[in-house]
Amino acid sequence: MREWWRDAVIYQIYPRSFQDDNGDGVGDLAGITRRLPHVAALGADCIWLSPIFMSPQKDMGYDVSNYTDIDPLFGSLDDFDTLIATAHNLGLKVITDQVLSHTSDQHPWFKQSRTSRDNDKSDWYVWADPLPDGAPPTNWHSHFGGPAWEFDPQRGQYYLHNFLASQPDLNFHCPDVIDAILDTCKFWLDRGLDGFRLDTVNYYFHDQQLRSNPPAQAKPQVMATDLYGMQDNIYNKTRPENLGFLERLRQLTDQYQDIMMVGEVGEMGRRSIEIMGEYTAGSDRLHMAYSFAMLGPDFTADHFRSCIEGFQQGAPDGHPKWSFSNHDVPRHVTRWADHAVDDDSMARLACAMLMAFEGTIGIYQGEELGQTETELVFEELTDPPALRYWPAVKGRDGCRTPMVWTADAPHAGFSTGTPWLPVKPPQAARAADQQTPQGILQFYKDTIAHRRATPALRSGATRFYDLPEPVLGFERHITDMRVSCFFNLSTTAQDIALNDDATLTGPHRATLQDRTLSLPGNGFAYLTHDSPLTPGH
C-alpha cells in the first residue's frame, strides 16, 4: 500500500490567522473550512493545524488545559468534524499539533498535582525540593528566559517548565501520565484525524537524577533569551527513554489505517539531524521528523547539502520532512533577503529548491503568496518572549499575522472585526486575489504539480554534485529516470558545464545552450537527461 505521507506536501495552518468567520478578530475552524479549496487547489496533500484545543492562550494554544475539546475561540467539536469531512472530500488529510510534553497550569491535572505531595496526581508533573540554599534543583534554563523551575508555595517545591512558568512539564517517568496521554491521542484518531504533528518531540523525558547541564562547548552569541544555548542540554531533553514512548505511540497509531506522525525536533545544528535519524529509524518510531536545521539564517549550498546528506547517512531507513518557514521563525523570504535579487526571486527559488528535496515537504500559510515578515511595534506584540525582551527580541508575531485574501477588503479579507495581529500594507499587497497568472501562487501550483508528475522528484534517490558555492546541485533518480536540479543561491549569474545532453523541464529560470546551463541571480533549473541512469554515471 502506498504511504501517502512519504512524498506529501503538508500545508501548515495557523488557526488564529487563517480566516475569521465570526468577526471576533481571531481565525476559527469555520473559516478554515471555508478556505480549504484554496489549499486543495494549491496541490497540497494534507493540512497541519496548530493547536486548537482548550487553552488560556498564554502561549497561543501551546498551553493546553483540556486535550479532548476544542477551544471556543476556534469553535466546537462539531465544527472540527465538519472540517475533517470537508477536507477529506477535497482529498486532503488532516493532522493536528499534539503538545504532549507540557500542559497549561490551568489543566485539571496540574491543579490537582500542586495541592499536595500525596494525591492521585502528585507525581504527574516534575516536582523537586529546593537546594539547601533555596535555589532551583538544577541549572536548567527555560526557552523563554530565566530558570526552568518555578517555586510553588503550596507544595513547597519547584516544578519544571521548559517554556513559560504557566506551562509545567509532565512527568513521563510516571506510567499513568503515558497512559493518559495515549488515551487523548486515541480520542482524536477515533474522530477521524489522519495523524499528529508532535510538538517538542524530544522534550518528553528529563533526567531523573536531576543533574545540571554542562556548559556548551561552542558558545553562542548570547542575546536576551539565548542563555538556553549556553548549556549542553543533555539532561533536560533528548533522553534515551524518549524512544520507548515513541514506540508506544507508534503501536497506537498502527492500530489505525494510513496514520502519520511527524515530530518537531527542538534542536539546532548537526545534532538535530542526528536526532531526526534516531527518531525515524526502523518502522516502530516516528514516521518522519523535522528540525530547525533549515529554519535558520544559513543559506549556502554546503548547509543544505550537509542537512540532507547528514540525514541520509545517519538514518538510511528513516524519513525526513523539510520546510523553510513555520510559525516560530521569520518568514524565509525576509530571512534570506541578503541573498535575494528581490522578494519574488527568493520566493521562487526557495519553492523550486524545496520541491526538489527528497522526503516530505512542509509549507507555511502565506508562503505560496511570497509573503514577507511583518514589521510590528511594541504595542502590537502578543508573543511572550518579545514582550519580555523587546527590543532585543522581536518575537514570533511577525510571521503569524493574518492570511491575506482580498486586498481592498477590510483587513485583506481576514476578518470583519479587528484582527488579533494587524494586517499591514506590504502584506495586504500580496493578497490571493492580487496574484496574477505569472505570480507566486501560480508558481507554487505549477512547481507542486511538476513534483507530483515526476516520479524521480517524488521518490527518487538523491546524489549531490560537487559544485563550488553558491550553486547547489544534485540528481534525483529512479529506475530509468534522471532529473538534475540546480539552484543559484546568490545574486550573481552562474554558468554550469553539463557532461551530457539534457532538456529543461518544469518551472525554471535558466537557459541551456550547448551543454552550458546559465543561471541568473537566484536562478534554478530542473533538467531531464536524454540517457537513463547507468552505473558510474
Image (cartoon, helix red, strand yellow):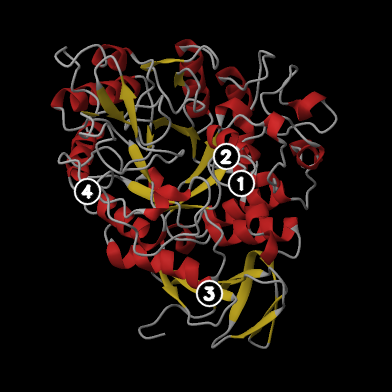
Secondary structure category for the residue under label 2: helix
Is residue 216 at least partly visible in the picture? yes
| 22 relative to 450, above or below | above
Whether pointer 1 and pointer 4 mark residues with C-beta atoms closer than 8 Å, the reply is no
Q: Three-letter amino acid code at disc 1?
A: Ala
Whether pointer 2 and pointer 1 mark residues with C-beta atoms closer than 8 Å, the reply is yes
Q: Is residue 294 left or right of residue 309?
A: right
Location of residue 78 in the rendering, given as x and y in whole percent from the top left corner = 47, 11
User: Front-most of 142 and 75?
Assistant: 142
Location of residue 385 in the rendering, given as x and y in whole percent from the top left corner = 53, 37
Secondary structure category for the residue under label 3: strand
Q: Which residue appears at 76% of the width and 60% of the height?
A: 342
Secondary structure category for the residue under label 1: loop
Given the current orientation, which residue lies at the most extreme right position? 408
Q: Three-letter amino acid code at disc 3?
A: Gly
Quadrant in the picture for residue 299: bottom right
Q: Is residue 97 left or right of residue 203?
A: right
